[in-house]
Image: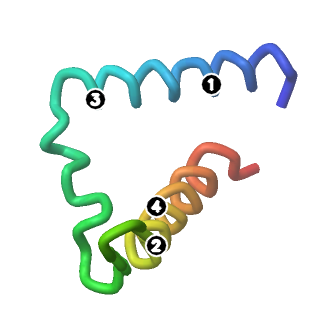
């Protein structure tokens, strides 16, 4: 893929993500609330490890990459 086309695709993806986050935030409210996401909280610290959410995001990105960049 030519660099110019790659930049257009990346820019379009960032634009779509921004519009989704701004106008329909309920669409991504699931992130960090799935079973398997670890939250550890004490009086002085907070640790959040979104294992399951990141697996879902990775699968979605892999599927989209295979759809758009298949030869």
Please state which of residues 67 and 52 is positioned toward the viewer in this rendering. Answer: 52
**CB of mark 3 within 8 Å of CB of mark 2?**
no
Q: Residues within 10 Å of mark 4 (few under 14, many from 20)?
A: few
- Image disc number at residue 9: 1
Q: Which residue is drawn at 62% across and 51% down?
A: 65
- Please tell me the numbered disc located at residue 20: 3
Q: List x then y, in percent, for residue 54.
A: 48, 67
Determine whether 5 is above or below 57 in the image.
Answer: above
Whole-number angstrom distance, CA of label 1 to CA of label 4? 18 Å
Please report whichever mark, 2 or 1, sits nearer to the chain's N-terminal start: 1
Tell which circle, 3 or 4, labels the residue nearer the N-terminal end: 3
* Residue at the spot of label 2: 49
**Pointer 1: residues within 10 angstroms few (<14), some, or many (20+)?**
few
Identify the mark at residue 57; answer none if there is no mark: 4
Q: What element carries label 1?
A: helix
Closest to the camera, between mark 1 and mark 3, is 3
User: Which residue is located at x 69 percent, y 52 percent?
Assistant: 70
Image spot of residue 4 (x, y percent):
80, 14
For the residues carrying marks 1 and 4, which lies nearer the camera in this image? 4
The quadrant in which residue 56 appears is bottom left
Name the front one of labels 2 and 1.
2
Residue at figure coordinates x 31%, y 64% from the top left: 32
- In the picture, measured across the screen, residue 32 lies left or right of residue 60, that is left
Q: Do the residues labelled 1 and 3 touch (CB within 8 Å)?
A: no
Q: Is mark 3 on a helix, strand or loop?
A: helix
């Amino acid at each position: 893929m030519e660099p110019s086309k790659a930049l257009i695709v990346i820019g379009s993806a960032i634009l779509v993500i921004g519009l989704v986050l701004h106008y329909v935030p309920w669409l991504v409210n699931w992130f960090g609330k799935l079973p398997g996401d670890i939250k550890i909280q004490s009086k002085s610290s907070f640790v959040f490890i979104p294992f399951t959410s990141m697996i879902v995001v990775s699968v979605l990105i892999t599927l989209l990459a295979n759809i758009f960049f298949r030869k």
